[in-house]
Amino acid sequence: MAYEASLMQALYEAAPIAVIVVGQDGLIRHANGAAEKTFGYGRTELEGQSLGILLPERFRSAHQQWLRIYFKHPRQRSMGNDKKLLAQRKDGSEFPAEIGLSSFTLQAETVVAAYIADITARVQAEEKLAQYARELEAQNAELDAFAHTVAHGLKTPLNLIAGYGELLTSHGSRLLAAEKQRMTQVIVTQSLQMDQIVHDLLMLSSVRRTDITMEPLDMAAIVERAQLQLAQLVVQYDAEIVVPDRWETAVGYAPWIAEVWGNYLSNGIKYGGVSPRLVLGSAVQPDDAVRFWVHDNGSGIARSDQSRLFTPFTRLNLAHSEGHGLGLSIVRRIVERCGGQVGVDSQPGKGSTFWFTLPAVPQKKQIQNLMDFRRPIGSWQN
């Protein structure tokens, strides 16, 4: 018997997980070495204390009631398999735990041994696996949409290019100069449209994979760059773009944020009113994020359509609409990768305000950071 008692004591101390022995009064009788390491208490600190000391305070009352019920019909059972249980260390930090229970008689008293395992690593792995599953589902959906875009978005311009190319090759000598000029222009236009589709698809893919460094942004320079790239469109639509005297400072990845402004501005020009007028601005929000926006004087967007705007490969049936439904989904992915959000506020007949947020720069760092990270417009390359 002495050998068996010695063996049991050795096994008890050698157990790799915390073992807490509790009496019917809910007080701890014994704790092994692993319990000391798991919870940060010394053994003498635990013995004589309520088991509730190892639980977050918000769960202690319910636990005491459960323990009384359990002692009426003690049995071997496990807890935490189908739901997350939380335990609490001496320093107040909480961790997910799995608990096994078994009852036995110790010195003529029925006691319960609680085997408590810290399953933080397992929970984190499960959460990561679930995140991977969600990302894989999203990627599969995008692959299906990609196939749809390639099949339909590229098919029309390819057919036009092939058709007009064949006409020019076979009957070019019999065509009037004006007809040949028109066909050539169609070929150029459709080629540019295909190039834009390929560019947008590559951008959509790269935003997920590319590692970026978040830096304070010189938003005035970024917007200027976007305006320069849209100069021809501004002239074509006789558009006016109004920029603020100063911009609030935020952090992000400059080449991508230039894409965001380019998309918002081009959409505002195309879908704005006759002689579009775009008003740009920024403001610090109560949550310390910075909100940027483009307000247009267009016809507005119905509420039922607003939720679909930032969905990949979705394009609304707007008047004189063009494109392939990738632009705003790229905007959303860029901004979310930079830690912000996107959205639109619009009412039919009152124009639309497309906005996005980015994390703000702490006030005391803004001046120095802008000096450190200011670069010429032409130095930003995708």
Image: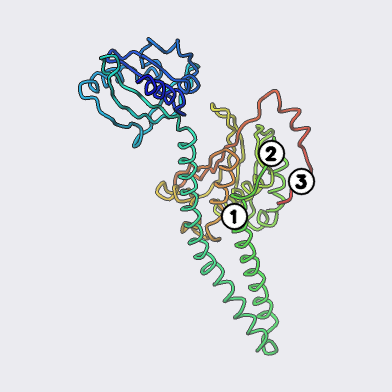
Q: Is residue 30 above or below residue 273?
A: above
The image quadrant of residue 178 is: bottom right
Q: What amino acid type should be assigned to the residue bearing mark 2?
A: Met
- For mark 3, give the secondary structure: helix
Q: Quadrant of residue 102?
A: top left
- Residue type pointed to by label 1: Ser
SS at mark 2 in the image: helix
Q: CA distance from mark 2 to mark 3?
A: 11 Å
How much space separates mark 3 and mark 1, taking CA atoms?
24 Å
- Against 70, residue 248 (above or below) is below
Distance Cα–Cα, label 1 vs label 2 = 25 Å
Read off the residue under disc 1. Answer: 205
Residues under numbered marks 2 and 3 in contact, where contact means CB atoms less than 8 Å apart: no
In the rendered view, does 108 fall on the left or right side of 357? left
Question: Residue 24's spot in the image, x, y percent?
Answer: 27, 15
For discs 1 and 2, the disc positioned in front in the rendered view: 1
Residue shown at the point (58%, 71%) measured from the top left = 157
Give the percent coordinates (x, y) of residue 196. Answer: 63, 61
In front here: 116 or 174? 116
- Please give the name of the residue rendered at 24% of the width and 23% of the height, measured from the top-left corner: 70
Q: Position of residue 132 (x, y in %)?
A: 50, 47
C-beta proximity under 8 Å, tags 3 and 1: no
Classify mark 1: helix, strand or loop: helix
| Residue 93, placed above or below residue 297 | above
From the viewer's perspective, is 23 left or right of 146?
Answer: left
Q: Nearer the viewer, residue 275 or 369?
A: 369
- Given contact means CB atoms under 8 Å apart, are the residues at marks 1 and 2 in contact? no
Residue ID at (44%, 23%):
10
Earlier in the chain: of badge 2 and badge 3, it is 2
Q: Nearer the viewer, residue 335 or 133?
A: 133
- Find residue 377 and name its label: 3
| Picture disc at residue 219 | 2
